[in-house]
Amino acid sequence: MSATLYAAWLLLVLTNAACAAVLTPEQKEVSAFVQKMYSYSADTFEFGEFGGNYLLKKQCMLMQEFFLESLLDKPQNNKSCNLGIRYPGAGSEELRYNSKPGQMPKPNLSTPKVEGDKATISVSTKDYGKVQFFLTKTDKGWRIENALYDEWPPINDGKCRSEFLRPPSAWQKKEAPLLCQ
């Protein structure tokens, strides 16, 4: 290897090492929390099937592990507690077709932004869009308190093509892309 080529390679290695983000413990917690949510199959998470049976109360208990209870509807009349935001661009037919573990595209997580007991993290999935989660730390751990999900497929026309799950608070609105503020 020539000296010039070696110097270029060494510069590239050092630059990559310097740019690699070292996550804080809180950022690692948020990433692990979101990765855990995406580890469930669509059968379980979106459709409430456990062991081949539809178990509404068990699905609602699962949703309470990830979302503030104030976001979730009370289970009644066989209505699901699922908010339908893990894969915002996927319809129920696509989710049902790809319902087994590992069949949905692997999510790509951004580096979480954590400030005290609040955090944001964006998750994108091939073919199914992007969602930005707004989390708060509770006595039970991190919980999602709102989400901003993109229209899918994306349209780049200079307009906000995203929608909040619930009306945003001031800090959530501030964290949204400029077009959506």
Image: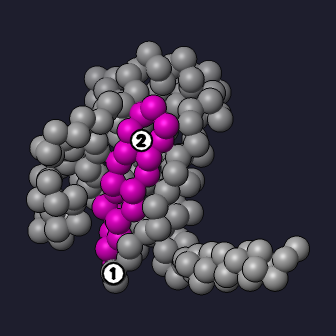
Image quadrant where one finds the C terminus: bottom left
**Magenta includes 94?**
no
Real-space Cα distance between discs 1 and 2? 23 Å
Q: At which x and y percent is residue 3?
A: 81, 82
Q: Residue at x 29, y 36 (%)?
A: 154
> Judging from the image, what secondary structure is the residue with disc 1 in?
strand
Instruction: Look at the magenta stretch and give its main secondary structure.
Output: strand
Labels 1 and 2: the sequence-earlier one: 2
> Judging from the image, what secondary structure is the residue with disc 2 in?
loop
Crowd tier of the residue under label 1, counting other residues whose Cα lies within 10 Å: few below 14, some 14–19, many 20 or above: few
From what the image shows, is residue 56 above or below residue 39? above
Q: At which x and y percent is residue 69?
A: 30, 53
Residue position for label 1:
115
Task: Please state the extent of the stretch shown in magenta in the rendering.
Answer: 117-138
> Callout 1, which amino acid?
Glu
Drawn side of residue 52 relative to residue 77, left or right: right
Which quadrant of the structure image shows residue 6?
A: bottom right
Q: Residue at x 88, y 74 (%)?
A: 1
Q: Residue at x 49, y 74 (%)?
A: 27
**Magenta includes 127?**
yes
> Callout 2, which amino acid?
Arg
